[in-house]
Image (cartoon, grey):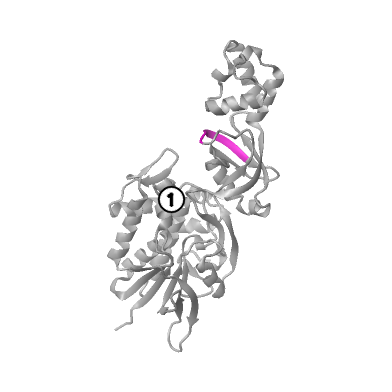
Amino acid sequence: MAEKIRVVVVGGGAAGYFAAITCAEKLGAAGSVTLYEATAHPLAKVRVSGGGRCNVTHACFEPRELVKRYPRGGRELMGAFHRWQPRDTIEWFAARGVETKTEADGRMFPVTDDSATIADCLTRAAESAGVTVITSIGVRKVERLHQQGAAPDFWLTLTDASTVRCDRLLLATGGNKSSAGLTIASALGHAIETPVPSLFTFHIDDARLIGLSGVSLEHVITSVSGTKLKESGPLLITHWGLSGPAVLKLSAWGARELAACNYEFKLGVNFAPEHNRDALLRVFAATRGGHAKKQMANWNPLGLPQRFWERMLTTAGIAPGTQWAGVSATALGVLATLLTAAEFTVVGKSMNKEEFVTCGGVRLSEVEFKTMQSKLCPGLYFAGEVLDIDGVTGGFNFQSAWTTGWLAGQAMGETA
């Protein structure tokens, strides 16, 4: 009788669970799957993501378009997304009783708007598949053993000092600097791209923003002075500066450049992205001609939030009660510059409250993306953010976790 295949998954996040479930369902009675989570709270990131709603994936079903949302890993994910993409993720959850919905911006959530729906589904699926989940115990050290006449296996030392052996090992511990997975991967010969934060908000101390916390603008263009970095999308003014997709996407694409300058740089913002300064001056001239008696605070030709519009007027030296007919050309010029070519000094960053994403991890050239197996250490697999893969905000990081987890689980579940 053939000996059972022993699989260990290190990390109880989205990728780890998905890989463990996939592997256990494929192995059946031919093997065992054990998942170790170092904390007492598996799937913690799933539970807090999307403001507690869990942005499961994104309604982008064409791999060539999908990979454009990954600052790092897009090229490697192209083939992977042809094997498992958002449509497959949606169908997987639907088959287990979880229906999803698509919002106007393409983000997809469970119809319950409750991340517990996703976490509970994964927990039930793992239990049903026979995955043994062990919490509050992590993996401290891994040695690869070579016994004569036998396939190599792994000897794991756990954080409680006990030891475990396995035939196949998956690292799915996330990609931050303290990740045990990166330490283990390095000890087994893998190069690690230095982790730095991605998807973060900008600290800005500027009088133009004081008192405007909570104001959001539907569409702006952001850029980093002295670089080619430029993004567009909604913007949110916060107590500490600026956030929202226009900032988060910029932080993702510029993760390494912004880390290199210690998060101190000049941020450009066009609050009226349909216009440049000259075009906006023409809009103002037409407004002054057609609505001369209107007070400027009450007649906003751009549809900007009222509090924000009034702040821009006062910053330009225009009293809110000024009539359009009475404003000087000089003041309108200042206002047009403030709205189309604003510059802010960024003095630091904060992680976005819903995101814990890093740029960096196991070097992708050392991983076979058909199976997620190490090219350097047979029997070792990777999934999720332990790899040097990260996406922009909108469900893309979860999708790469589902995809790489599924591929790894399929490969580890092979019995032939």
To which residue does mark 1 refer? 49
Q: Is residue 215 above or below residue 403?
A: above
Q: Is residue 202 above or below residue 403?
A: above
Q: Residue 35, can we see it?
A: yes
Give percent across and percent down for residue 91: 33, 52
Total number of numbered labels?
A: 1
Q: In this view, does 237 lie above or below 324?
A: below
Q: Kindly report the secondary structure that dominates the magenta region of the rendered protein.
A: strand
Q: Which picture quadrant has residue 241?
A: top right
SS of the residue at dot 1?
helix
Q: Between residue 172 and residue 318, name the one nearer to us.
A: 318
Give percent across and percent down for residue 263: 65, 50
Give percent across and percent down for residue 10: 44, 68
Q: Does the magenta stretch include residue 218?
A: yes
Q: Residue 58, can we see it?
A: no
* Mark 1 crowd level (few <14, some 14–19, many ≥20, 10 Å Cα): many
Residue type pointed to by label 1: Ser
Q: Residue at x 54, y 18 (%)?
A: 298
> In the image, 348: left or right of 171?
right
Q: Between residue 137 and residue 334, name the one nearer to us.
A: 137
Q: Residue at x 64, y 34 (%)?
A: 207
Viewport quadrant of the C terminus? bottom left
Q: Which residue is drawn at 39% across and 73% down?
A: 7
Q: Between residue 149 and residue 51, name the one nearer to us.
A: 51
Give percent across and percent down for residue 169: 44, 72
Q: Which range of residues does the magenta coloring cover?
A: 214-222
Looking at this view, name the residue that lies furthest to the top: 293
Looking at this view, name the residue that lies furthest to the front: 211
Q: Which picture quadrant has residue 309?
A: top right
Q: Between residue 84 and residue 285, name the one nearer to us.
A: 285
Q: Does the magenta stretch include residue 281?
A: no
Q: Which residue is drawn at 30% across and 66% down?
A: 129
